[in-house]
Amino acid sequence: MLARLGPPAAIAAVILLAPLLFQSGYHFRIGALVWINALAVIGLNVLMGLAGQVSLGHAGFFGIGAYAAAVLPARYGLHPLAATAAGAVLCAAVAFTVGRPILRLKGHYLAVATLGLGMLVAMVLTNEVWLTGGPDGMPAPRPDLGGWRISGPETWYWISGTVLVLGVLLAQNLRISPAGLALGALHDSEVAAGTLGVDVARSKLVAFVVSAVYGSVAGSMLAFLNGHVTPDRAGFLQSIEFVTMAVLGGLGSMIGSVAGAAVLVVIPQVLTFFHEYEHLMLGVLVILIMVLLPSGVVPALSSLLARRRKE
């Protein structure tokens, strides 16, 4: 029970207590961005941390979810919340269709294949001007419930935080389920997992589809928060950012996903005081974190605390 509820409870406590430090709507917006990015990274962590599969195209699903929340209501009159669900279904279908052939690849071949998928999505979103608005993007209508228009950074802080806690809870349930145990075996050795009766191809595909759905929902929430979407949300740099968040926080750690997202969302805001040296200092900090904490922030700190208790 502790393994299942511990991480969601810890993250919920942070979400509830963090506003005590906020001084304006800007801080609520930064908090919402952390929770939204963390949700996408949790999906990526299911694929990379649990199943041990590499993906450099996760932003493709993020972009599909974002544009589903914008295109379907604007062009076809679908309710924004229904558009979010439709985007998740579309991403699941794309992941299922594309995942079956590309997940047969391994290592850097798989990385290049997923990179190509992400680039293809970004190209479609950029070039299909009649549908997506082209490079400039398009507005995303805010959802409403019973006449209440859901808008404002504070509102989306609490909504994205709630969705994040639910996402972590589902991921934790997956981790300790038979399917999650199969993914863990797959991560250690595909040959050994297959010998023990694990359907390797099916397990990889399940992880890929789950990862895509998480990315899609996160993308839709970002579209609603910003009120606008652009193709760069499906671009290569966004995918690299997600991978960096997952690695910084700690692969396989749900709390690590949140920590990694917080590092790459909050620190750049702090470093804006240094103007032209902002990106240089961010790069140096990321390198230092990876050198000093190679397993990721959360696993490294957990190991340190465990050693202290034994002393």
Image: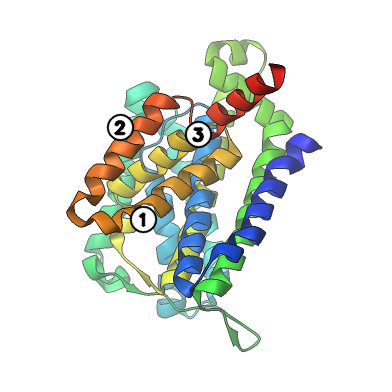
- Residue labelled with disc 1: 270
Residue 158 in picture, x, y percent from top left: 61, 67
Q: Nearer the viewer, mark 3 or mark 2?
A: 3
Q: Quadrant of residue 222?
A: bottom left
Residue 229 in picture, x, y percent from top left: 35, 67
Crowding near pointer 2: few (<14 within 10 Å), some, many (20+)? Answer: some
User: Disc 3 and disc 2: Cα gap in Å?
Assistant: 27 Å
Q: Residue at x 51, y 61 (%)?
A: 31
- Element at label 3: helix
Residue pushed farthest right?
1
Q: Residue at x 68, y 39 (%)?
A: 172
- Residue labelled with disc 2: 112
State if disc 2 and disc 3 touch (CB < 8 Å).
Answer: no
User: Disc 1 and disc 3: Cα gap in Å?
Assistant: 19 Å
From what the image shows, is residue 302 above or below residue 10?
A: above
For marks 1 and 2, the one nearer the N-term is: 2
- Element at label 1: helix
Crowding near pointer 1: few (<14 within 10 Å), some, many (20+)? Answer: few
- Amino acid at dot 3: Val
Crowding near pointer 3: few (<14 within 10 Å), some, many (20+)? Answer: many
From what the image shows, is residue 16 above or below residue 239?
A: below
- Amino acid at dot 1: Val
- Amino acid at dot 2: Val
For marks 3 and 2, the one nearer the N-term is: 2
State if disc 3 and disc 1 touch (CB < 8 Å).
Answer: no
The quadrant in which the C terminus is found is top right
Question: Which numbered marker is on residue 297?
Answer: 3
- Would residue 216 be found to the left or right of residue 307 on screen? left
- Would residue 216 be found to the left or right of residue 6 on screen? left
For marks 1 and 3, the one nearer the N-term is: 1
- Would residue 189 be found to the left or right of residue 269 on screen? right
Can residue 92 be seen at all in this image of the molecule? Answer: no
